[in-house]
Structure formats: C-alpha cells, structure tokens
Amino acid sequence: MRKISKIILTCLFFLSFSFSYYTQGDAKIYFNGQQIVLKSSSLVNDNRLCVPLKEFSEKVGFKYNKEGTSLAVSDGEYRTVHFMADHDQVMIGDIKYHMSNTSFLAYEEWYVPLGYYSWYLGYTLNRNGNDYYVSKRLADVSVTEEEIKLKYACKVNDNDVSLNREGDQYVLNLKDTVLSFPRKTFKNSFSSEIILGQITTRPDVAKLSIKSIKPLFLNRSADNEIVISQKKIEKTEEVLPIKEQIIPEDIESILQDKVSDKAVWIPSFEGVSNVVLSVKGKKSTLTGKAVYKDGQYIVPAEKVLLHFGFAYKVSDTGSLLVKYGDKQEVDTKVKAYIINKETYIPLQQLAKRLGFGLRWDYRIHTLFVNPIIGNVSFKRTGDGADSVQISSYVEIEPRELVEFTGPDRIILDIPNAVLDVKEQILNIEDSNIQIIKAAQFDEETVRVVIQVKKKMNYGMAISDDGTKVSIQHSGRIDQVWYQPYSKYNLLTILGEELGKITWKQEENRLEIDIPNTAYKAKGAYYFNDPFLEKIVGSQYSWDPVSSRMSIYFKGVPQLKITQASDRVEIRIDNSKGKVVYEKKQVIVPTEKPVSLKLLSGKTIVVEAGHGGSDVGAIGIGGKYEKSFTLDTAHRIKEMLTAYGATVLMPLREDTSMSLAGRTQFANRNNADLFISVHCNAFRNEIIGGTTTYFYGATSLPLAKSIHKQMLSQLGLRDIGVRQARFFVLFHTEMPAVLIEPVFITNTKEYEMLLKPENRDKIAIAVVKGVVAYYKGK
C-alpha cells in the first residue's frame, strides 16, 4: 500500500509540474516595433511565454470573441483564428492545426503561447533575453520581367513600407519583418540585381535593394501584397462607362422603405471632415468636410452603389435609377444631386430604400455601409429537413458553417452586414433545431448561432442572387480513397448521408452529381496510376446544395458504380493489366511537343455569356450569340483541361443564370482565373474586330496575353484591350477577362464563326494566352 501511495504522489507531482506556470514579470513584448504593456501578467508554461488572449488581442488592434469553447481572434479583415478553450486545437477556416501546449485559464483570463499566437496570425516571434519581438512574416517573393511582388502572411498597412532612391538603386526597408526563406537574389528587365535579405533580428528588419536607373513605383495588389514595377497604379475610383444596355420602358419603382430607422441611424456629420467610408469591406476616405443638401448627408453614388453591384443613372425628373446586374431597372424615388459633374445621393434615405444598414464607429472615424439582414426565421418541413432561413435585400457573402460542441451548435458569420430583425432569439419545439440566436457580433459582422438537440450534418444553400441563405440538413463528402486490387481498382468517395447520385460517362471522363450534399474534401486529387489521371470535386450548386465529381481516366475503362449512404464506389476493370487505352483526341494549342501539365493545380472558370431566355446579340444570319458562346466555352474547357487545369463552367447547357450567380460561382469555388466568352455586335455591319475587356489592374496582364493570341489566331482588326465596368469583371475576386473575338453583326466575321475550326482558333488563343500569362508570372 505504501508503495502504491508513493507512485500516486509521484504521478501527482509530475502532473502538477507539467501543468504549472509562473509569472514572467520582466518580459517585454514588442508588436510591430511597439511595446505592448499588459495589465495582466505574462506567464511561462512549459518554457513558453503565454499571454492573456483577450487583453493582448485588443492591445494590438485585433478583435476577440469567446463563443463557448471557441476563443476567436481576428485582424478585422484578413484572417480569423479560433483557439479552443483548454485544448491544443486551432482552427483557421476549415483547416485544423495543433499547438504543443493547450490554452489554459489563469486569473480569469485565457492564455495561449505567444509563439503560436504569432504564427497562426501571420507573424513570427524572436526572443532576445526577456525581450520578445512579434513581427510580420514575409512568406514569399516572386519576380517577373514586369514586377517584384512581396507576399506577407498577414495584412500589411501602407505606412509599413516606403521605397527610396539611394544612388543607382532603390531600397525598400521592411521594418518589423522576418523572411520565411533565406537571402534571395534575382534580376529582370528593369534591374541588373535584386537582393532580398534579413538585415537584423531583434529588432527585425529586412531589406530589398534594386539596382535600376529606371523609375520604379510602389503599389498594392492585395491587403497582404506589395508590388514594385515601372507603372504607378493610381488610387482612383474612376471607371469607364458601362456598356450600353437596353432599358425597359416600364420601370419598376420602390415605393416604401425596407429597413427601420434604427438600422440607418447616424449622428450629424456637419462640420466633420475626412469621414472614412467602409462599403462591404472596401474603404475610402471622403476628403474635406461632409456635404449636406436639403438637410441630408450626401455622398458620391460611385463610392457606395458599385460595391453593391448597382449601375445607376439620374432620370429626367432627377430621381436615381439603379440596375442590379441583368435585372430590370428600378426607380428609387430618391432625389439625386449633381455636384461638379458627379452624382451624389442622400445616404440614409437611399439606404432605407435599397436595404443597406449604416453604423458609425467614432473610435476609428469610420462609417460602415453594409447589407441589412432583414429576416432570420425557422422553416418547418416535417421530413427532418427543417431549416433556418436568412435573407437580405442585396447580395451577402456568408462564411462557411462552423460546428461546436458543448452544447452542439452551428455558427454562421456573415461579414459586412447589419442586423435588423424583430426577434433575435427563436425557441423551436419538436425539431432537431432548438434555439436560433441572431446578433450584431461587431460593427461589421452578423452572427447566427443554431443550437441543436443532436449533432447532424448541415449544409448551406445560397440563392442565385446571393440574397437568401438556407441552413438545412444535408449530406457531406469528406474524402476520396483509391486502392488497386487483383481484379479491379477501387475508387471510393467517402462521406455521410449522400444523396442519390446521377452519373454519365463520356469517353475518358466520368461525371457524378450528388444532390443535397456539401463538398468538404480537397478540390483536386492527382494520381500516378496507369488508369486514373485526376479527380476534381466542387460544390457545383448552392441552390440547391449539390456536389459534382469529375473523374478523368487515362483511357476509356469499364466501370461498375455502386452507392451506399456513406460512400460511392467505382470499380475500374484492370483485367487488361497496364494497357492504357487511347484517349479521346483533344486539339492541343501548340505547334511543338510540350508538357500538358503546365496548368496543373489551377482552377479556371469559363463562363459562356448569356443563355436561356437571354439570347444575347442576334447575328447577321439570324443565329443567337448564346449558341456561339456556349459552344466556344466548351472548346476552351476541353483544351484547358488537356493542359492539366481544373475547369468549371457555371453554364454547361443553354439555361438562364444571373450575373451575380456567375460571379459568386467563381468566387465560392476560389477560382484562379475567370474567362467570360462573348461576341460583339453593332448596328453598323461594317464594324468588326477583336476586343478584350478587363477591369482591375491585376487582370490587365491576363487580358493582354489572351488578346495578343486572339489577334494572332484570327487575324482581325485590333480594337484593343479595354477597361470596362462589366458586372462579371467588377465583382469577381480573381483576375478576370471578357473576350469578344468577333462581331456577329459583321458578315465576314459571322461566317467565320459558323465554322468549327474558327471556334477552335478562339479556344486555342485563350489557352495559349493563359499559358503565357502563367509563364510570365
């Protein structure tokens, strides 16, 4: 007994020691060069300095929220990290990580190791004695002939860097920066020597030096990117006019307000200068004093309406007319003001009419303009598929669903939104859904929490126009598994509660559609196998929720397909050994042998313009534009796929789809490129030629590359690469172009388009342009 007691005491001693901590009172913490002074003590646990999560986050300007076991930290715009209470687990989006320590509660504060905190938020930690330096982490550098791009793992502010001329070179001093890689040297068209290296640590300073006699400029392409090139990108909101559209004679009118006064309340801005306007997360400063007309606060229409997807104009009566994507034009019945040839709108009045919410944060001098969440409700179906319905008046962009336990619940965050509902808590009876809570989580985020009786799979359906969200019971695809056997090779799609599949096999490709199923697996799987080439999976539809698996074989195999609730099994006949069947011949846009894997890992959305009831322009011979764009888009898809790309098409058939649905399809699938296929038209039959459109500066290199190849393949008049604020270009989050290779109102070009070999030439031009674009990056 004495021996057993001794063992127990020894175990208790080591347990207490391993979970003990002590105060590190003389620790000094510097975050981006600024010393952070904490009221709470810094603690050392397992030889690692730990900080109070809430206080430290607020001190460095991050947002903190505790929801059950989730300890969420967000930098506000770029990244959110979920630490878990009394656990080593960390969640960033859907990806799970682990710390070597657990978080722990001390002095009524949750503590985490400073090193892990820094790393998961995109920073790094260096120590010098009792001094701890948390600095930005520079993750990558890429150099092309036209630019140098530095990519950080965290958000970078404009005042963090400056480019200075020193003799025959430019110098970029990167304060509070640590490189994630050793010293690198490059050269390109404008510099004979480019050197990037770490100058000092503790404090952390890196340096980029560029030997160049040519003028260089510092630009931004994203929140976490710095670009140096010979071109200066001016920060301007100026945009070219919208392409001419036919406006219906009978214009719908908005006759009553959609939101409450509370949702659009703001203080008086009279006498206030330089208000920062944040519209759906996009910030700009209204320089000078606030402008008032007829007692109303007015702002430039361009600063607000474009980010919501509205084109606009002023009617003959002075009323503001708006048009969302390809929808009918609407009269807001709100008076517009023209000041110095610029259209101004009364913000509060228009917000109430269109369904925007306004929130003023005096601490950061920022006025937030975001979509209103006007409805959070419960829908009972009686078949186990009860759902939560969330709706707005304009497009919203909800994040992925996050599941928590203790109690079981689902959380949905909707960034850039304002809550305006009558009931914020709904108690539900006789359903797996028990309680629905909606709240304004912070100035920019609406959070919906759904407490359930038992854990079930829930998926999120989003309407085509992005204004309605439904959270309902659904199946889920988790992973793909592949295993060779003696008589067959087995490909298994694993998940839970999968819907009844439909499938079709075309030559060497098998497509499987799985309804009412959320896709949670990897986007693409590649195989070094004599039978199987790759598998591409995607959330192909959000309304209703549906997944699609595209399976590419190295030949035309014999298949047997079976399904259970948790899996789909595909047996591939391997009885002929390693014989590779001849693939379907695909035109490859090259004159000499090259690797057909140049685009592996790239997801490209190819959108066929128009479709369904929207026929597009009418050709001189009577054929509709939509028939040419759909056929050409399929040809582009086949050729890009031959080069290894994952190609998704919002429209595979002649059906209708809104412009918002097309851009959201690309954004939600995290596409790398977006290519919209159109044909041009004009009332004068003589006009002809090739045009390529872009909007954002990051899309210009792609537009130039494709346009150059288009001219080479078709040999038509060069109308040029043009900037245009087309809906699908303005609202896509990746480089995007819209091609108009020919005029179908021109006799010669229409007859060219009738021949399949010329539609192949258009596809070849696009693929060559995409390949050249990536080679040049």
Image (spheres, rainbow, N blue to C red):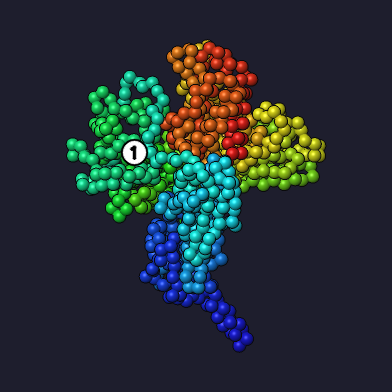
- Can residue 214 be seen? yes
Residue occupying the far bottom of the picture: 2
Residue 509: quadrant of the picture? top right
Residue at 51% across / 58% down in the picture?
Answer: 206
Q: SS of the residue at dot 1? A: helix
**Quadrant containing the N terminus in the rendered view:** bottom right
Q: Locate residue 483, reporting x and y percent.
A: 72, 46
Give left or right: position of 153 versus 640.
left
Residue at 20% across / 37% down in the picture?
Answer: 293
In the rendered image, which residue does mark 1 sit on?
303
Task: Give the camera-side residue of 410 and 630.
Answer: 630
Give left or right: position of 472 versus 306.
right
Residue at 67% across / 38% down in the picture?
Answer: 597
Q: Locate residue 475, reporting x and y percent.
A: 55, 44
Task: Give the camera-side residue of 654 and 776.
Answer: 776
Q: Which amino acid does label 1 sit on?
A: Lys
- Can residue 434 be seen? no
State whether residue 406 is above or below residue 540.
below
